[in-house]
Image (cartoon, rainbow, N blue to C red):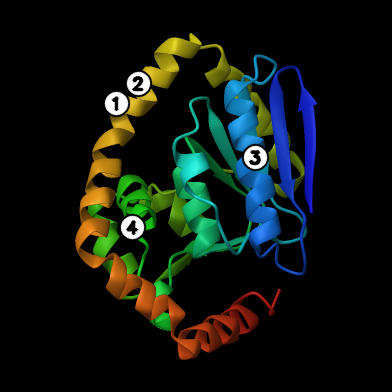
Amino acid sequence: MLERDLSDGILTLRLAHGKVSALDLELCDALRAEFENAGESADVRAIVITGSGSTFSAGVDLRAIFLFPKPAIAAINGHAIAGGAIIAFACDYRLMSAGRIGVPEALVGVPFPPLALEVVRFAVPRQHLQPMLYLARTVEVAEAKGMGIIDEVMPAETLLARAQEIARKMAEITPAAFRLTKRQVREPFLRDAAEIASVSAGEIDAQWADPAVHTHIRQYLAKTIGKR
């Protein structure tokens, strides 16, 4: 379900749950617990999160990642669609080897939860934000790098090692300075998410509860990720 390896202070988490690593409640709970425990553990200096097979993830437990007080690196080994993209966007550095990345929520008729939308706004450069959202775009690795939504393109065989190298480098920063700087950068987006939630939470929840939306999600995932 969730494979973990701790070496030299770097905790590597590999999502390995079902055909496309779709995060059900059990895996969400496990992922959240890993981030919460790592945030408090003196043995963990940084986290690298990656997928298995050819898919990074198809779901997310976002808050624990976005608020993680230590370095979090995304080693994107394949498709990072919707929640998978948002996991990556919530991290501090993104490396990718293959697949597509993007947030096609509008295509399947689902609104963004407020924090998820703010994470996308945080990570996607302004000139690319509205086209990605309104056209429900997913892009290949080279275009993602050109857009500035991933930091490095790496061959699959060296992706994880490079991500761990970046994690070690970030972990050299004084922990208190890193934690404070990260919080200062991200807190405005958290405040905006709370404001959006205060006025639109009911409408968002109703849309997510629509059975037709769930059908569209399953059809989209089968079409997009099932072609691997």
Looking at the image, residue 115 lies above or below residue 178: below
Structural distance between the alpha carbons of marks 1 and 2: 5 Å
Asked whether the beta carbons under mark 1 and mark 2 sit within 8 Å of each other, the answer is yes
Residue 74 is situated, as x and y percent measured from the top left of the image, at 58, 42
Residue 184: numbered disc: 1
Residue 203 is situated, as x and y percent measured from the top left of the image, at 28, 74
Residue plotted at (44% across, 85% down): 210
Mark 3 sits on what residue? 33
Mark 1 and mark 4 lie on one chain; the one further toward the N terminus is 4
* Numbered disc 4: secondary structure: helix
Please indicate whether residue 128 sits to the left or right of residue 58 in the image: left
Please indicate whether residue 134 sits to the left or right of residue 49 in the image: left
Residue 35 visible in image: yes
Looking at the image, residue 217 lies above or below residue 79: below
* Numbered disc 1: secondary structure: helix
Residue 117: numbered disc: 4
Residue plotted at (30% across, 30% down): 185
Structural distance between the alpha carbons of marks 3 and 2: 23 Å
Structural distance between the alpha carbons of marks 4 and 3: 23 Å
Residue plotted at (45% across, 80% down): 209
Q: How many marks?
A: 4
Residue 186 is situated, as x and y percent measured from the top left of the image, at 32, 35
Mark 4 and mark 2 lie on one chain; the one further toward the N terminus is 4
Mark 3 and mark 2 lie on one chain; the one further toward the N terminus is 3
Structural distance between the alpha carbons of marks 4 and 2: 22 Å
Which quarter of the rendered picture does the C terminus lie within?
Answer: bottom right
* Numbered disc 3: secondary structure: helix
Three-letter code for the amino acid on which mark 3 is drawn: Ala
Three-letter code for the amino acid on which mark 1 is drawn: Gln
* Numbered disc 2: secondary structure: helix
Mark 1 and mark 3 lie on one chain; the one further toward the N terminus is 3
